[in-house]
Image: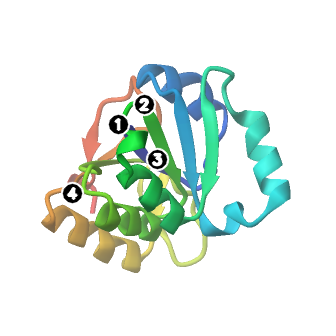
Amino acid sequence: MIKLTRIDDRLLHGQVSFTWTPAVSADCLIVANDKVAADEFMKMTLNLAKPPSAKLLIKSLVDTITFLNDPRSQPMKVLVLINSVKDAAVLANGVKEIQSINFGGLRTKEGTKLISKAIAVTDEDITIVKELLAKGIELEVRQVPTDKKVLIETLI
């Protein structure tokens, strides 16, 4: 069962390990990212950041979709981590269970604009956000679980 799907360009870090994982009672973290899945050094680095209470899986987007759609994954309490709006849309289109996506952190870079304290998006991201909203997927902004949930449509 998916407990949280989170967009965070840092993927797995202390905030995820020590606040989100216990808040949603996750026992499995999945980093869904094609580049990281093919990079042994990145996998090792992310493994260092995982909480001891949870299993860490690092998979490509396609393999994550297959895993999450497999009935054998249902007993797990899964926190899915992706680092872009585009990858979140790929997962949401491939996994019907994803009905809500948390925007946690997307840092400012060239071509982005801040829509909240920790979320910077491109015009392409906004187009994808509108497509996800049209499908009825909740898109909310919170850095930590104790923050007030802010719906992204109020920010764009």
Q: Which mark is residue 117?
A: 3
Left or right of 145: which side holds 39? right
Secondary structure beneath disc 3?
Answer: loop
Q: How far apart are marks 4 and 3 (CA)?
A: 15 Å
Instruction: Kindly identify which residue carries mark 2.
Output: 77
Residue 97 vertical position relative to residue 89 in the rendered view, above or below: above
Tell me where residue 54 appears, x and y as whole percent: 60, 27
Q: Residue 37 is drawn in which quadrant?
A: bottom right
Mark 1 vs mark 4: give the one in front: 1
Instruction: Kindly identify which residue carries mark 1.
Output: 1
Q: Residue 145 is drawn in which quadrant?
A: top left
Q: How far apart are marks 4 and 2 (CA)?
A: 28 Å
Q: Residue 9 is drawn in which quadrant?
A: bottom right
Q: Which amino acid does label 3 sit on?
A: Lys
Q: Which mark is residue 153?
A: 4
Residue 153 vertical position relative to residue 12 in the rendered view, above or below: below
Looking at marks 4 and 2 on the same chain, the residue that comes earlier in the sequence is marked by 2
Tell me where residue 24 appears, x and y as whole percent: 41, 25
Residue at image location 21% in from the left, 53% down from the top: 154
Secondary structure beneath disc 1?
Answer: loop
Q: Distance between the residues labelled 2 and 3?
A: 29 Å
- Circles 2 and 3, Cβ within 8 Å, touching? The answer is no
Tell me where residue 96 appears, x and y as whole percent: 25, 56
Residue at image location 30% in from the left, 30% down from the top: 148
Q: Residue furthest front?
A: 72
Residue at image location 74% in from the left, 44% down from the top: 46
- Circles 1 and 3, Cβ within 8 Å, touching? The answer is no
Q: What residue type is labelled 4?
A: Glu
Q: Which amino acid does label 1 sit on?
A: Met
- Circles 2 and 1, Cβ within 8 Å, touching? The answer is yes
